[in-house]
Image (spheres, helix red, strand yellow):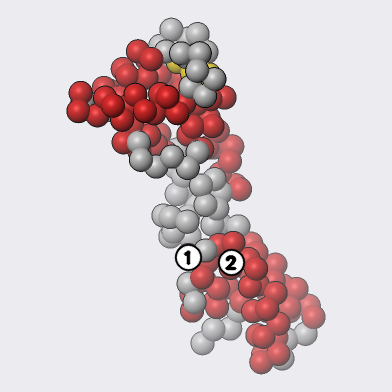
């Protein structure tokens, strides 16, 4: 039996796993229908609604709310690792060196070059932390370099340590 709003949103319909924003929009209606059929009083309705939103807060898309600080720390760690001369800027050579350390060979050089072009938004030939952060958080998904870099650093931060079992979304 589905006896809570979380049961409906997260288990019966799996809506939270498919589209967390749509799931948020359905919470009031789900609670209303369940209250009607379950005979819930106003206190129970408020409790169910709060629990549903709390459950949905564990799903965050690219940057979950409770993971934002950790994500920024991860980005800064990756940036500092690449910034071998501690200049606060990434040179073309530093980015290529990181790509090589990730095991990306000559065959992926054009992919790395494209990533560098995406990172260097002001076109000055160097990548600042702000540019790198914007690139990291961007929707660019074609870059093998970005995938490998993200895989290395996101996996080391314990990103899924508080997970509800969802490794996507």
Q: Distance between the residues labelled 2 and 1?
A: 9 Å
Q: Depth check: 27 or 114 in front? A: 114
| Residue labelled with disc 1 | 18
Image location (x, y in percent) of residue 1:
51, 87
Q: Is residue 124 left or right of residue 65?
A: left
Q: Residue at image x 59%, y 37%? A: 69
Neighbor class of circle 1 (other Cα within 10 Å; few <14, some 14-19, many 20+) is few
Residue at the image point whose x is 71% and y is 82% from the top:
32
Check residue 22 in the rendering and tell me which mark sits there, or answer none. 2
Q: Is residue 35 visible?
A: yes
Q: In which quarter of the image is residue 98?
A: top left
Q: Which residue lies furthest to the right in this view?
A: 42
Residue 4: horizontal and vertical position, in percent? 60, 79
Q: Quadrant of residue 40 in the image? A: bottom right
Which residue is depicted at the point 57% across and 24% down? 130
Q: Where is residue 26 in the image (x, y as percent from the top left)?
A: 63, 73
Asked whether, in this view, residue 34 is left or right of residue 168, the answer is: right
Q: Determine whether the residue tagged by mark 2 lies in a helix, strand or loop.
A: helix
Residue 76 visible somewhere in the drawing? no
Farthest front residue? 123
Q: Are circles 2 and 1 on residues that touch, CB within 8 Å? A: yes
């Amino acid at each position: 039996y589905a006896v809570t709003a979380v049961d409906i949103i997260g288990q019966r319909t799996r809506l939270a796993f498919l589209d967390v924003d749509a799931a948020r929009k359905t919470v009031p209606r789900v609670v209303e229908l369940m209250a009607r059929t379950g005979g819930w009083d106003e206190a129970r309705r408020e409790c169910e609604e709060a629990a549903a939103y709390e459950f949905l807060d564990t799903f965050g898309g690219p940057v979950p709310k409770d993971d934002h600080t950790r994500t920024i720390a991860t980005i800064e760690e990756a940036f500092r690792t690449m910034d071998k001369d501690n200049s606060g800027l990434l040179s073309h050579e530093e980015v290529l060196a990181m790509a090589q350390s990730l095991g990306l060979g000559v065959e992926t050089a054009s992919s790395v070059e494209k990533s560098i072009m995406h990172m260097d938004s002001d076109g000055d030939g160097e990548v600042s932390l702000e540019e790198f952060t914007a690139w990291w958080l961007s929707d660019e998904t074609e870059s093998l370099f970005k995938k490998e870099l993200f895989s290395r650093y996101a996996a080391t931060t314990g990103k899924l340590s508080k997970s509800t079992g969802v490794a996507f979304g």
